[in-house]
Image (cartoon, helix red, strand yellow):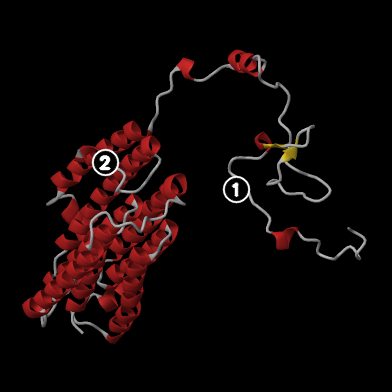
Amino acid sequence: MTPTYYLVLAAALFTIGAVGVLVRRNAIVVFMCVELMLNAANLTLVTFSRINGTLDGQIMSFFVMVVAAAEVVIGLAIIMSIYRSRRSASVDDANLLKY
Amino acid sequence: MNLLADALASGTVTTGEAVTFWILAPIALGGAIGMVLARSAVHSALLLACTMLSLGVLYMLQSGPFIGFVQIIVYTGAIMMLFLFVIMLVGRDSRDSLLETLRGQRLAAIGLGIGMALLLCTGLARGIGSVTAVGLDEANANGNVQGIAADLFTKYVFAFEVTSALLITAAVGAMLLAHVERRKGDRPGQKELSRLRFRKGNYPGPKAGPGVFATSDSVATPALLPDGTESERSISPVVPVRELTPAEAAPKGTDGGKRK
């Protein structure tokens, strides 16, 4: 076994997250799929950090976590305010900009 | 932790690491697939938390104890709790509609996913299939946290400072989005409420309670008005109106046949 297995696992997780974003309709679940994709990218960064023998990858994944935390806060606030005005958390219902 | 880190820090993959990987990778994959397939948003959130926990252990396995603990504390501790909080607030019972707005979109998405997985995996296998890892022995010589701190506060200090601007912007933005300003006149006071109550055509007394009768003690049974009609006002709109089937309404024979 080589560290490449971690990268393959990360690729699989990223793909599952991408399919989830395309398939699911609930805005919160779509958002969780985005989080899964970010996590997969983090696993890739940590693995590359080990392959290259420097800590830069781990620091980069640390920054990804900070950005993800900020993104979650804003995203969930947006979902909440959409829900407040439209009584729905489905991504299909928020289509005002389409017309 | 030091002992574990020392044992695992080398570039070669030990048997223990392989065993842990083969236990945790299926859990992470299963959690991820379950998250996409689960119909309830709460189940999705819990399965995602499971995936994130196993990813945290995988980080620790790859000589990143600090990032592994941050993963567990920040992701499963804070972010998933925030998700659960919003699910409970917003969409607990908002299930996914099975209606497809674009025809064939689901199948196309799954095909796209399989194609992407194949592309990524073959690319990885061909590109770095037999790579030998340098390992973090040298970088972690003074400890993982110390190594990260040394890099973070010298090489990446500017990015680290910019992060503070990002975080404060996010906090202010969330406050603006989630806060609802209520003006003083928006909410009726005691005087207005009392006037509404004793308005002409409004019955000022309490509403009739739902049915506690000889035959029923259910809140779904409407109260009877003096003329024998059912009062719709007495049942909560949340309680669904339940029609008894003839089989349910028939005497159960528990009263010794005395009832007609």
Residue sitting at x 73%, y 33%: B208
Where residue B61 appears, x then y in whole percent?
29, 73
Amino acid, disc 2 = Leu
Residue B221 placement, left or right of B71:
right
Q: Which residue is mark 1?
A: B240
Residue B258 placement, left or right of B29:
right
* Disc on res. B199: none
Q: Which residue is mark 2?
A: B167
Name the element at disc 2.
helix
Name which of mark 1 and mark 2 comes first in the sequence.
Answer: 2
Pointer 1 indicates a residue of which chain? B
User: Is the residue marked by circle 1 packed among few (<14), some (14-19), or many (20+) residues within 10 Å?
Assistant: few
Where residue A84 appears, x then y in whole percent?
39, 37
- Tell me if residue B53 can be seen: no
Amino acid, disc 1 = Pro
Residue sitting at x 59%, y 40%: B237
Residue B220 placement, left or right of A64:
right
Q: Quadrant of residue B44?
A: bottom left
Q: In this rendering, is residue B39 above or below B185?
A: below
Where residue B110 appears, x then y in whole percent?
23, 68
Residue A22 placement, left or right of B213:
left
Residue sitting at x 23%, y 56%: B102
| Outermost bottom residue | B15
Residue sitting at x 84%, y 48%: B214
Q: In this rendering, is residue B1 above or below A74?
A: below
